[in-house]
Image: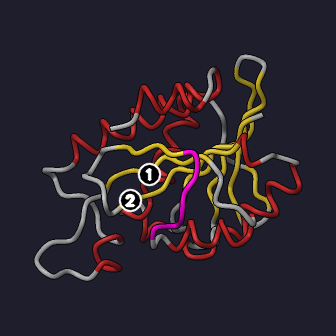
Amino acid sequence: MKLFIGLGNPGPRFDGTRHNIGFEVIDRLAESLNIEMQQSKFKGLYGTGIVDGEKIFLLKPLTYMNVSGECVGPFMDYFQIPEEDMLVVYDDLDTLPGKLRLRTKGSAGGHNGIKSMIAHLGTQEFKRIRFGIGRPTNGQAVPDFVLNRFSKDEQADVMDGVERAVKACEAFVHTSFDKVMNKFNG
């Protein structure tokens, strides 16, 4: 069993923003695995499927980013999904747009969605793909920056990053996360 979670904010206003890159990866993964995201539970939109005999859950918490754990914790409890089978994808200010940083554990690093997940799960030991969105320039405030869209100059790198993140998720269905990290980090 595997659970793939993409973090973001619900609603069309946030579609395509830097903060919603986790949603974008999950949407693309759903297309790739032919999993329909039409079910809802615990303030989240999800879909399920079977890939090579493995049950797969895809989840987008619709609680808003800062309280993502309110969805993820109960969802994992209900479906009895252990933390070692979970992989979360979210935006990372400290990485260049489109670059990936895969980790098996770690602190929230200032990311409120991850802070909420750690609080609700009671652990920071869960697999993650930190998707680079870059840092604001020209004195732009971080909240404004993460709720803006990528520039035209960043689009190619971001689309490449989305495809690499999807491939990393797919690889995790078939192999250890250590091998996935070795192949997709950087």
Q: Is residue 169 above or below residue 60?
A: above
Question: Is 106 within the magenta?
Answer: yes
- Give the side of residue 80 with respect to residue 121, left or right: right
Q: Which secondary structure class fits the magenta region best?
A: loop
> Residue 81, how many percent across, how many down?
81, 46
Rendering quarter of residue 19: bottom left
> Residue 14, how many percent across, how many down?
43, 68
On residue 92, the disc is: 2
Q: Amino acid at mark 1?
A: Arg
Name the residue at 55% across, 34% down: 169
> Residue 166, how many percent across, how many down?
48, 34
Q: Tell me if label 2 and label 1 are in contact, CB under 8 Å.
A: yes
Name the residue at 37% across, 58% down: 16
Q: Is residue 80 above or below residue 64?
A: above
Total numbered labels: 2
Question: Is 127 within the magenta?
Answer: no
Foreground of the two, 115 or 123:
123
Sooner in the amino-acid sequence: mark 2 or mark 1: 2
Foreground of the two, 44 or 84:
84
Foreground of the two, 26 or 138:
138
Q: Circle 1 sits on which residue?
A: 130
Name the residue at 48% across, 46% down: 129
User: Which residues are drawn in magenta?
Assistant: 104-109
- Give the side of residue 20 with respect to residue 97, left or right: right
Q: Quadrant of the N terminus?
A: top right
Q: Amino acid at mark 2?
A: Asp
Label 2 packing within 10 angstroms: few (<14), some (14-19), many (20+): many
